[in-house]
Amino acid sequence: MTPLLAAAQHEPSPPWIMALFGLGMLLTYVGVAHEKFHKTVAALVGAGLLTLLGVTLGVFQYTDIYEFLKKDLNIFGVIIGTGILVDVTGRSGLFHFLSMLIVRATGGRAKLLFFSICGLTFAFVAVLTIVPATLIICSLVMVICKSLNYSPKPFLLAVAICANSGAIVTFASGLPNIMIGTAAEIPYVQFLYISAPYAVFSLLLALGVLRLAFRRDLPWKQTDDEKRALQARMNEFDPWALVDNRWVLIRSGAILGATIVGFTLAQLMGLGMDFIAMSGGTAALFFAGKSVEDTIAKVNWTVILFFMGLFLIIGCVESTGALEWIAGQVVELSGQKSVALIALMTAFAAVASAIVDNIPVAATMIPVVQNISGLGLPVEPLWWSLVLGCNLGGNGTPIGSISCVIALYTLKKEAGVDVGWGEFIRLGGTVLLLQIATSIVYLEALHLLDWLPKL
Amino acid sequence: MEPTQREVDRDLDTSMKMFERVQLGEVAPIAPRAPRQVLLALDGSTQDATSIEITVTLVNRYPCQVSILAACAGAESVAEAARARLSGSAIVAAVGPEDPFDPILEAAAKHESDLVIAPCPFGRDFEMIGPDSAGTVVDVLLARLNRPILVVREPHEIAQPAFHHIALRSIGENEAAQAAAVWAVTLAAAGGSLELVLVFEEEMRENLSMLLKSLDLNIETSDDNLIAALRKAHIRLHRALQKSAEQFDFDYTLTVEHPPESAPFPDRSFSALSLVVVALERSDHMSQGYARDCVLHRRQPVLVVPRN
């Protein structure tokens, strides 16, 4: 238990202060969700006001805010290190090259191409995180579909949905995972044998729904002549032309691979994920040559400042004891039964993430789960509920996940095809319902069989 | 955390252009073309030693006929020394009273030289003239000579071996780029490296923006867009050089230089680069200016490959 948490549990503030801080957090989240405000500015303004309020009302000392931030410093290391690594690897053309190589190998046949795009999306998101992976695959889809005369709509909707399955594969596949994994101290390898198998299952589930939904939108069966013509057109694409230097490509792949291996061995070596991420980033910078400054400038400072604001807000609210109170209410609602709590947490995280950004959802739910741990219930399944719910929830609405936003935007901008909320919810919502139902069953089964490792 | 719409537009556009430009069909590697006749012009300056070393390396690689021209008074002894080092070579003409560029142009035409090797500044050491002038002789040769000229600019020793690290530089769209690439592949050493440098100048963007604006064409002329266009224009050359590198066992890199190096001398250490090959499209003033600039501001030997 953190000293802060302990303090909060011992000295809860009066209810009106809890309500005031809760309202402040809620208003900040409204600001974060509102188009008129910049997310980072909203988070920083909220953090500033709650800090002032906390110090003025004597809820905490000013120096306590360093404690709020200290416990999450490693997240900044992971974000900076992986950001640098992804940028340098991206510059080498590795992912563009690999994606074109694989797509070319399909010979342009609709069925193979569709499932390859889905698989590529899943794998790239797992390694690269959701934004860069989605951008690469969406652009590839547009170029290939234009060349082969396919409708890009089934492909881009599939990218939007499959990306969210890829986001639960590893610790570093997305920001919610990094936040939850860091807070719960989940080793990287645990992601590989707890969430990765379900990620594959959720992908297969999504593929089944997508195949059914698009049964009339793609030529799933093609004649030999059609296949030959498609192959000839695909042969015009030369993936090697995407590579500026072969050794830079190999080196980038090697550094990325070594970093992933480092993540899996971090716990054994007694090192943190932030150290491994920063080492990978530093190795990438070492070979970046003239582009070092450009690469450092590409680090997502917006995200880092946003997190700083968010962590301060959470710390302020947590210090009033409000999150502990919420945790108690959640436990009460579940009848103090883990089985119900897992279902409740997974469903809530998914629904909330379908409506608002999954990062504030994860940030808010993390201290709630931490507080539940003090109430005598096992929290391991709840951490995984958050991981699965926060990521898969994105499939629920067109704005639920950045992969959906990018894919639908690309479809509208490049092909002039508008996908309405109703149409998307029919598809994504169906996938989400199936995925959330099965993920609850999966986590309940692991919990009841006692197969979830203790944290 | 979502990227802004502007960031998505930019990244999507860049990525799509990358994929679009590789739809290029079959591309054959560039084959080396061995020179048969080389004209070595000597002037008795300190640059001569470097010129001779380069010629020796070239002849060892591609046995060819070397014609040695003592183009300045006092260069005869150096010419004799060069003939002694280059078996099968011949001293082709004595120095006349006319301007030194005339005998070089005449000898190159008479012997149908595939390559002319000449010092710069001609007849003088670098210290006498400084880095701001290539001298009249080289200026005239660059303007009139219809064949590649390898200008030995500085009295420094060349990096060893002579053609180990080559930079092939081309500014904008350049019709001489293919011919320059043939020379670069011809000279690239096995185990060495070749870098294709596509140079993009701010002035290019400004001129194009102004023209499009005056034509009321609403086309975005951002640096990213123009660099993507530059890459697209050279994609077949890039792939051909990549295949040549694989076939002839040298390392190959494509770089877009933006902004161009502006230092009086290159920022790359001398030992890292042994030859600069520059494509010169004579009908293009920007290309002319850039080729001359390369000769002036590079301490490495510069091979200028022209196309009228």
Image (tube, coloured by chain):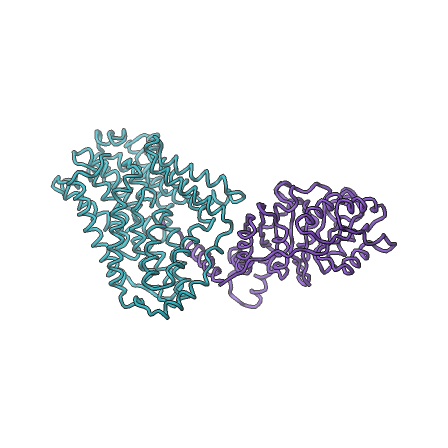
Chain colours: A cyan, B purple
In the figure, A315 relative to A37: above or below? above
Residue B86 in percent (x, y) is at: 75, 47
Question: As drawn, is A283 to the left or to the right of A407?
Answer: right
**Residue toward you, A47 or A222:** A222
Residue farthest along the right direction in this orientation: B97
Is residue B109 or residue A323 the one in the foreground? B109
At x 31%, y 48%, the residue is: A167
The x, y position of residue B7, in whole percent, is 43, 53
Relative image position of residue A402 (x, y in whole percent): 34, 53
Camera sees residue B80: yes
The answer to which of B22 and B3 lies nearer the viewer is B22
Residue placed most toward the observer, A436 or A304: A436
Q: Position of residue A86 (x, y in %)?
A: 42, 46
Q: In the image as oriented, which residue stretches furthest toward the left?
A: A335
Res B297 seen here: no
Q: Quadrant of residue A134?
A: bottom left
The residue positioned 73% from the left and 57% from the top of the image is B113
In this picture, is B25 found above or below B264?
below
Decide if residue A392 is on the left or right side of residue A414: left
